[in-house]
Image: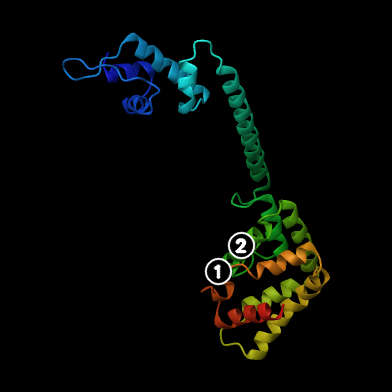
Amino acid sequence: MRSKEVAELAGVSVRTLRHYHQVGVLPEPGRGTNGYRTYELSHVARLLRIRTLAELGVPLERMAALLDDPADTASADLLADLETQLRERIAHLEGQLRRVSELRTSRARPDLTPALAEFLAAVGGVEESGLADLEHDASVLLARLYEAGGTPEDLHELAAVLNDVRSRGEYDDFAARFEALPADASEADVRGVADAFIAAFGPMLTQHADTAMGGRLRQLREQDVPAVDLDPRLNDAQAAVLRLIGDTL
């Protein structure tokens, strides 16, 4: 049989057949006088066994031991490994399925983890703000940096604290004034908007200064990340507000 015929019989491509030869799992047959490979029954049978193992998820590098071991002593360990891997994949897929179902029910954004969605809700106003994209991007970055090395529960804790701050209305006052700030705002107006943010979050930072949360927030200041105050979506006065906040807190 020729390569194309054998490949069609086994349900693989000729390219896959050649790959099996290259990695050594399927010995190359001899060539006829016409220069073409001539496959015998032993080659076809081995190829069919390779196809069966591949469908089970057996990696190519472990196939030779199974195919060449008449007593099948390697099968038990391999099948145990495969079962473990498959159970892990099933658990992962079930988790994905639950998440997709939750997203369909809640109509939440699919690009956000549950912890991040909660955090964004806590920092507020993403949907209503004229600076929605910037606020969203900055919050996603802050959340990722804060959560790095920790757990979703850490972000949940921070979200709860921020939500408490926002419930008092001070953050909403800052957000409205910040968005309305014109590029040519006076120094006093810039300072006033910065003070509004400091009034909202300063007490929280002081309260948690000696906690793990406070330590992690301080570490964020040392991260090498894009500076929000340089974002082109901000006007000069808004950028100045953020610099004042960073210098003060």
Q: Which residue is mark 2?
A: 141
Q: Position of residue 147 (x, y in %)?
A: 68, 57
Q: Residue at x 49, y 25 (%)?
A: 62
Q: Position of residue 23 (x, y in %)?
A: 38, 28
Residue type marked 2? Leu
Tell me if residue 72 comes above or below residue 137 in the rendering.
above
Q: Quadrant of the N terminus?
A: top left
Q: Position of residue 216 (x, y in %)?
A: 72, 64
Tell me if residue 22 comes above or below residue 222 in the rendering.
above
In front here: 134 or 229?
229
CA–CA distance between discs 2 and 1? 9 Å
Q: Position of residue 10 (x, y in %)?
A: 38, 17
Q: Which mark is residue 212?
A: none
Splitting the image into 4 quarters, where does residue 117 fall?
A: bottom right
Q: Residue at x 60, y 28 (%)?
A: 86
Splitting the image into 4 quarters, where does residue 148 fall?
A: bottom right
Disc 1 packing (10 Å; few <14; some 14–19; many ≥20) = few
Residue type marked 1? Pro
Tell me if residue 156 comes above or below residue 184 in the rendering.
above
| Residues marked 2 and 1 touching at CB (< 8 Å) | yes
Q: Is residue 19 visible?
A: yes
Badge 1 element: loop
Disc 2 packing (10 Å; few <14; some 14–19; many ≥20) = some
Q: How many marks?
A: 2
Q: Residue at x 21, y 19 (%)?
A: 36
Q: Is residue 127 visible?
A: no
Badge 2 element: helix
Mark with earlier residue (2, 1): 2
Q: Quadrant of the C terminus?
A: bottom right
Q: Which residue is mark 1?
A: 226
Tell me if residue 84 comes above or below residue 210 in the rendering.
above
